Image (spheres, helix red, strand yellow):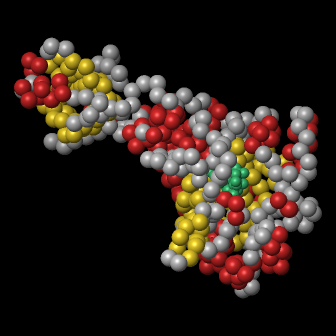
C-alpha cells in the first residue's frame, strides 16, 4: 500500500488509506483520541479508539502534539460533523518527528509572526498565499511561452546602476565593489538582438529606505523586452499578461482565494483594455478631487490612491515628465517634455504593478541624462554599443510579482506575498 494525499483519500471516500502529514489539532479522553492531520492540500479528522488499536498506536495517539509529523493508516468514511466532511478511523499510527510546544497559537502580533516566519509559513493563510504565488509564476511563464518569448537571464552582480544610485546595494566583489541588480533591463536590451522577444522572472534588489506596505528590498520582477515593439504594443502585452495571471489564479486557486476572504467577483471583472490616461490628465483628475500636484512632480502613493478611487480596474498612466524619468526613457516626439513610458496602477489601493517604456535610441541624449544624475557615462559604454550595430526601436516593462500577488490575494502588506520578506528593518529569519 502507498501513501496518498488527504485530497486523494477524500476522493476515494471509503476503504483503507495511508496518509501522512502534520498534527493540526489533537485532543484525547480516556479511550478516544481525535487528531486533525494536515498535509499540503487539506486537513482531515482522524479518530483513534483505544479498544481497536495496539498499545503502541494508542501511546502514539496520546503523545501526538501540534505540528508533530505522523503516518496514519485507517478506514476513511464520510462524516458530516468532521471539519472537512470525512473521518479516518485509525488502525495504525506512527509519530515520525515529535514536536516541542509550537510557539504559534492564536492572536500574536505581526512582528512575532514575522520573527517566527519559518514556522508561520505552515499556517493556512500563508500556505494559501504561497500556492497562489506558485500559480502566478507559472502563469507568467505560460503566457510568455505561448506568445513566442524566450526565457532569458541577466547577472545579479552588476557594475552599473539601472534605476538610479539611491537604491543600490553595494557588495564587496573580490577587491572591488559591485551592485546587486535592480532590473535586468540593460542586459535585456543587449539580448533582443539575437532573440527579439525575451522575458525573465528573477529577484531584484533595491535599498528602499521608505517603510511602505508596498516596498521590499528584495522582490521578484517579471520583465520583458522586445525588438520592434512600440509603447502601445507593450501596453497591450502587459494588459494581456495581467488578465491571464488573474484568469489562471481564479481557475486554480478559488479555494485559497475563498480562504483568504478575497472577493473573487472583483477579480473576475478585470478585463482589457484598461482605462488609459496621460500623466497630465491624471493631474487634471486630481485637481477635480481637490489635490494640486505641480506639473513635473512624480505621483506619490497618496496621489495614485486618490486617482484609483474612481476605478475598479487597473489604470494605465502614460507620458510622465521626461525630466524625472530614468535615462533610458525617450521623449515622446508628439508630446514634448514627456516620456514614452507607462505605469499600471492596480485598484483597491495596491499601487503601481507595472512600469514600462520605449527605450531611448539616441546615445548622446542618454549620456546627458546620466551626467545630470551624477553618473559616469563611461561605465555604460557596453550598453551604448547596442545602439551602434543595427539599433531598432524596442520596448519593455517590469511587473512587480509581489505587488500583483498582494493585490490578487487582498493582502494588507506586501511582506506576506513572499516567503521570507526583506525590508530595511526585516532581515531575519
Ligand atoms: P515605485 O514607484 O512603487 O517605487 P518604481 O517606479 O520604482 O515603483 P519600477 O522601477 O518601474 O518601479 O519597477 C517595476 C515594478 O516593480 C513596479 O511597477 C513595481 O510593481 C515593482 N517594484 C518596484 N520596486 C519595488 C519594491 N521595492 N518592492 C516590490 N516591488 C517593487
Ligand atoms: Mg521605486
User: Left of 120 or right of it: where is 380?
Assistant: right
Residue 174 x %, y % = 50, 76
From this view, report whether residue 299 is shown above or below residue 181. Answer: above
Residue 226 image offset from top left, x and y in percent: 67, 68
As rendered, which of 89 and 97 lies closer to the eye? 97
Q: Quadrant of residue 307?
A: top right
Q: Which residue is drawn at 73% across and 35% down?
A: 312
Q: Is residue 219 left or right of residue 43?
A: right
Look at the picture and state if 29 lies above or below 365.
Answer: above
**Residue 294 showing in the rendered view:** yes
Task: Using the rendered image of the protein, determine whether residue 154 is visible from the camera's viewpoint.
Answer: no
The quarter of the picture where the N terminus appears is top left
**Residue found at the far left of this picture:** 55
Q: Residue 103 sits in which quadrant? A: top left
Residue 308 at x, y percent in the picture: 77, 38
Q: Residue at x 66, y 59 (%)?
A: 167
Taking depth in this image into account, of 254 and 341 the one nearest to the observer is 341
Q: In which quarter of the image is ligand 2?
A: bottom right
Rendering coords of residue 262 (x, y %): 57, 31
Image point (50%, 30%), residue name: 109
Seen at 32% across and 19% down, the residue is 82
Q: Residue 312 or 59: which is nearer the viewer?
A: 59
- Residue placed furthest toward the front: 175
Count of marks placed on residues: 0
Task: Give left or right: position of 361 versus 380.
Answer: right
In the depicted structure, whether residue 94 falls above or below residue 234: above
Q: Which residue lies furthest to the top in this view?
A: 30
Q: Quadrant of residue 100?
A: top left
Amino acid at each position: 500500500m502507498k501513501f496518498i494525499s488527504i485530497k486523494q483519500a477524500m476522493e476515494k471516500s471509503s476503504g483503507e488509506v495511508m496518509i501522512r502529514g502534520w498534527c493540526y489539532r489533537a485532543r484525547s479522553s480516556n479511550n478516544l483520541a481525535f487528531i486533525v492531520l494536515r498535509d499540503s492540500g487539506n486537513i482531515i479528522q482522524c479518530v483513534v479508539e483505544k479498544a481497536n488499536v495496539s498499545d503502541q498506536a494508542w501511546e502514539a495517539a496520546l503523545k501526538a502534539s501540534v505540528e508533530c509529523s505522523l503516518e496514519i493508516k485507517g478506514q476513511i468514511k464520510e462524516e458530516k460533523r468532521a471539519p472537512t466532511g470525512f473521518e479516518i478511523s485509525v488502525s495504525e499510527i506512527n509519530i515520525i518527528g515529535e514536536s516541542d510546544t509550537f510557539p504559534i497559537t492564536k492572536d500574536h502580533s505581526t512582528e512575532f509572526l514575522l520573527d517566527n516566519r519559518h514556522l508561520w509559513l505552515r499556517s493556512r493563510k500563508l500556505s494559501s498565499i504561497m500556492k497562489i504565488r506558485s500559480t502566478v509564476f507559472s502563469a507568467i511563464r505560460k503566457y510568455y511561452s505561448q506568445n513566442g518569448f524566450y526565457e532569458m537571464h541577466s547577472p545579479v552582480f552588476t557594475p552599473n546602476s539601472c534605476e538610479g544610485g539611491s537604491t543600490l546595494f553595494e557588495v564587496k566583489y573580490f577587491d572591488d565593489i559591485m551592485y546587486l541588480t535592480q532590473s535586468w533591463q540593460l542586459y535585456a536590451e543587449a539580448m533582443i538582438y539575437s532573440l527579439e522577444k525575451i522575458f525573465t522572472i528573477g529577484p531584484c534588489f533595491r535599498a528602499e529606505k521608505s517603510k511602505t506596505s508596498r516596498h521590499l528590498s528584495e522582490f521578484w520582477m517579471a520583465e520583458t523586452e522586445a525588438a520592434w515593439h512600440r509603447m502601445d504594443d507593450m501596453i497591450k502585452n502587459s494588459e494581456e499578461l495581467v488578465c491571464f495571471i488573474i484568469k489562471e489564479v481564479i481557475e486554480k486557486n478559488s479555494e485559497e482565494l475563498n480562504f483568504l476572504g478575497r472577493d473573487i467577483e472583483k477579480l473576475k471583472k478585470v478585463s482589457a483594455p484598461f482605462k488609459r490616461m496621460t500623466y497630465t490628465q491624471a493631474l487634471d483628475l486630481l485637481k477635480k478631487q481637490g489635490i494640486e500636484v505641480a506639473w513635473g512632480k512624480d505621483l506619490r502613493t497618496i496621489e495614485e490612491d486618490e486617482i484609483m478611487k474612481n476605478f475598479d480596474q487597473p489604470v494605465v498612466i502614460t507620458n510622465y515628465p521626461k525630466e524625472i524619468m530614468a535615462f533610458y526613457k525617450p521623449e515622446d516626439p508628439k508630446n514634448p517634455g514627456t516620456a514614452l513610458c507607462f505605469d499600471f496602477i492596480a485598484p483597491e489601493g495596491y499601487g503601481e504593478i507595472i512600469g514600462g517604456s520605449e527605450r531611448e535610441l539616441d546615445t548622446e541624449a542618454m549620456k546627458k541624462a546620466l551626467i545630470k544624475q551624477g553618473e559616469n557615462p563611461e561605465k555604460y559604454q557596453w550598453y551604448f554599443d547596442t545602439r551602434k550595430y543595427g539599433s531598432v526601436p524596442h520596448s519593455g516593462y517590469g511587473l512587480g510579482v509581489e505587488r500583483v500577488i498582494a493585490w490578487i490575494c487582498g493582502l494588507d502588506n506586501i511582506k506576506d506575498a513572499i516567503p521570507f520578506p526583506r525590508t530595511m528593518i526585516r532581515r531575519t529569519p
